[in-house]
Amino acid sequence: MNLSSSSKSPGSIGNAHEAAHRDPAVVIFGFWVFMMSDLIFFGVVFAIYITMVGATAGGPGPKELFDFGSLFAQTMLLLTSSLTVGIATVTMRHERSRASFLFWVVITLLLGIGFLTLELYDFSEMASKGGVPSRSGYLSAFFGLVPLHGLHVTFGCLWMLVLIAQVFTMGMGQVVKLRFLRLALFWHFLDLIWIGIFSIVYFGGWVYG
Amino acid sequence: MSATEHGWLGKLSWESLVFSNFLESPSINEAVASAAGSLVILASIAILGLLTWYRLWGPLWRDWLTSTDHKKIGIMYIVFAIVMLVRGLLEGMVMRAQQAAAPDGFLHADHFAQLFSTHGTIMVFFVAVPFLVGLINFAMPLQIGARDVAFPVLNQISLAVTVSSGILLMVSLVVGQFSTGGWSAYPPYTGGDFSPGVGPDYWIWAIVFSGAGTTLTGINFTVTVYKCRGPGMHLFRMPLFCWTVLCASILMIFAMPPLSVAALMLGLDRYLDFHFFTNDLGGNMMNYANLFWLFGHPEVYLLVLPAYGIFSEVFSTYSAKTLYGYKSLVIATMCIAILSFTVWLHHFFTMGQSPTINIAFGIATMLIAVPTGVKVYDWMATMYRGRIRFTTPMVYAIGFLILFVIGGLSGVILANPTVDFQVHNTLFLVAHFHNVLIPGVLFGILAGYNYWFPKAFGFRLNDKLGRLSAYLWFAGFMLTFFPLYVAGLLGMPRRSFTYADLTFKPYMIVAFIGAMVVLAALITLVVQFLVSIRDRHKTRVPVGDPWDGRSLEWASPAPVPAYNFVELPTVTDRDEFSEAKEHGRAYQRPKNYRDIELPKNNPLGFILCVTSGILMFALVWYIWWLALISALAILIAVIASTFRKETEYIIPASQLEKDTEAWLALVEKSEAVSRDLEDSPRNVGYSKLEL
């Protein structure tokens, strides 16, 4: 697939045949704009979290609740998955075999599921120590922010499953390729959000908690 | 979680129906509520009956509900908005009647509170937004020379969730009670402790779903303006309307998320016992106020900027002059869009923060008056020495110019924190924001409706009745809201269902008379519509350019064919169509006809409308099994639609040739009419060149 030849600069003469919603430049740009909006969504939730850091209302705080060993593992899983999704993108761009592409997508999917499993385990551990959202404003903010990222990862995993099915039913055509490119962008985006969560929620909690 | 307390129908029971209260304890209050509920049911039955009688289900499904055509989606948005407008206006009338009748009113406090909550929610989210989105959908792709918006199916989905949220609001008239917490739904009052009923849940889900629709619309429009402009259409050659659309879309992308976050967090507080905004356990309700207005203020400009765009088109077209100060208008629009994010705190100057903060936000607020002033002068300069025709849109535009400036000035007064402390939460504020929203947004919408109607349907609206309606709107608006300024200065609190101090009474009576005039304006609008349909054979404009239009949307036949342009026009200048007419480039035969590919119909939007409606209803009434099923249905429908392979259909070149030749033949034999004959049957949409 050649992205540059079909992308048109603003004002240039486009292909009258091509419907806009299939033009790679339009589709990818649209996804960037969506991520911009999603970033604001996360940003606002981050802001609420920061204002509520002290609002533990006598309940457990970061120091009592966080398991840094598990968090380190989660971070590694997610960062590695960003690498593997990158490799999958390169395989696709260089038109390598469908098997090698799918291999890297499946690895990414497994890493994502691993991350989610550990995260859920962490939440249940927190709950057993009394760290539930109904306990305090702080914990509400925590459970408003971190699972929001987890939901995004879940959605990404679901997307990957659908895409794997589509590789088989629709083939590696432009439609599927474009969808994968957007998924890869989304996946990297979630990595960035996780870095924000790690720095502000977990590392911040470790420092100030 | 309180899920276990309820049966398989959740909180729903016989007592939830509005009529049960009336049967148990008949009173005028309950009669009004029951009448409203019956009206919803009867109107729905009537519509379903008429559709069946005239055998319109097939065409409705094929031509509208599954359509991905931006023009049809735009029209559906507008129809929806008009239905909601009628409800919102009637609610306003009932409230004015109550306050005029007070202290011996006929409504209970709770019912009055529901009225002002739904009135505000509906007018902002289900009238102003969808009406503007509809007009933008219709006109913007035509103006930039595009075949469609960037993502036609996404467009359909946005419409679907907006409409299902609106239907949810209609359902709240019949089943259960709506929120009593105002359109801004401030916690802790709307939290579970103080509002245990379903009211705030109705509000939350309607806001979350329609908000998602608006965000997606913003993305769609932004990408369309950036990436789908026709050949030669540089950004600075776009009609000003498109610039305001771009700015408003950017506001949608950035300003809707805080609202969604606020509503969802309120939902978590209510459903899952979170403590974001509660009084106890570290909740902070001021976070809600900040989030809400972080959305709420940009929202105001999200509404008014496209209206500015419509007025710009109207001033320029009906003055037969190019827009004065185009670049300054673009820059002013951008400035307003950016400044709109820096003023949200002026909605709660009385929160208790330091004077320094209040001053900063007060100054930022006053600064917005500067670019707005630039615009007002540009519009006046556009009219200066122009050949002005007082058509309906132009009458609205001139009314806007005068009345909006008054509203803007009262805004500058309110921007001063010391003044705001005095009039905070009084009717002065109510008068102010109606004074900007009615002349600013509503007049803009109605001007746009009259302006683009012939383009959409192929015949003109009756201009005489249109002007009459406009003048009635002016009179009604002034009579209703100017007394509220005085009552507010006298200290009458907003949202009061009664009062003991009879000083307020005369103002309330005048306001009620004003409300009746507004009702007359609305009725005139309906009559204008019906009369125009009756007379449609005398007002047809098939050639497509009834107003001597200046931008590309007028370059195609009316109604516009599905493909918009046979050959995408190559733009060489601003006011492209005027240029083309002047230099004889208009109405030309394309060099060659080529097949056009368009998106096929898609049932996804309709499916999502139904399933999301059921999902919201189930969530409101704690019917968990139904919520789960409908959520799964949404997921499956979306995933299934991504497996569709054939998503386009081809309009063959032969068809295009046939259409175009017929149209060109029509142009050939039509008489070009001068502007003096604009309102006569001789105007078939072929404008005479008058230099």
Image (spheres, rainbow, N blue to C red):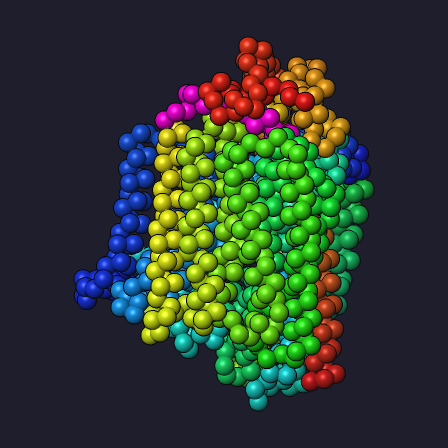
Q: Is residue B494 magenta?
A: no
Q: Is residue B303 visible?
A: no
In this rendered view, identify the residue nearer to me: A120 or B479: B479
Quarter of the image containing the N terminus of chain B?
bottom left
Q: Is residue B522 visible?
A: yes
**x and y percentages locating residue B227 in the rendered image:** 71, 39
**Would you place residue B379 above or below residue A142 in this image?**
above
- In the rendered structure, the answer to whether residue B642 lies left or right of residue B465 reads right
**Would you place residue B517 above or below residue B511 in this image?**
above
Quarter of the image containing the C terminus of chain B?
top right
**Start and end of the magenta stretch?**
B534-554
Residue at 78% from the left image edge and 46% from the top image edge = A91
**x and y percentages locating residue B446 in the rendered image:** 49, 42
User: For the stretch drawn in magenta, what is the main secondary structure?
Assistant: loop
In this rendered view, identify the residue nearer to me: B135 or A146: B135
Image quarter for residue B244?
top right
**x and y percentages locating residue B341 in the rendered image:** 66, 61
Q: Is residue B546 magenta?
A: yes
In this rendered view, identify the residue nearer to me: B400 or B623: B400
Considering every residue shown, the one lying at the far bottom of the view is A58
In this rendered view, identify the residue nearer to me: B322 or A71: B322
- In the rendered structure, the answer to whether residue B182 lies left or right of residue B33 reads right
Residue at 46% from the left image edge and 58% from the top image edge = B482
- In the rendered structure, the answer to whether residue B375 lies left or right of residue A136 reads right
Q: Total label count?
A: 0
Residue at 72% from the left image edge and 68% from the top image edge = A196
**x and y percentages locating residue B266 in the rendered image:** 50, 69
**Would you place residue B299 above or below residue B594 in this image?**
below
Image quarter for residue B557?
top right
Residue at 57% from the left image edge and 89% from the top image edge = A58
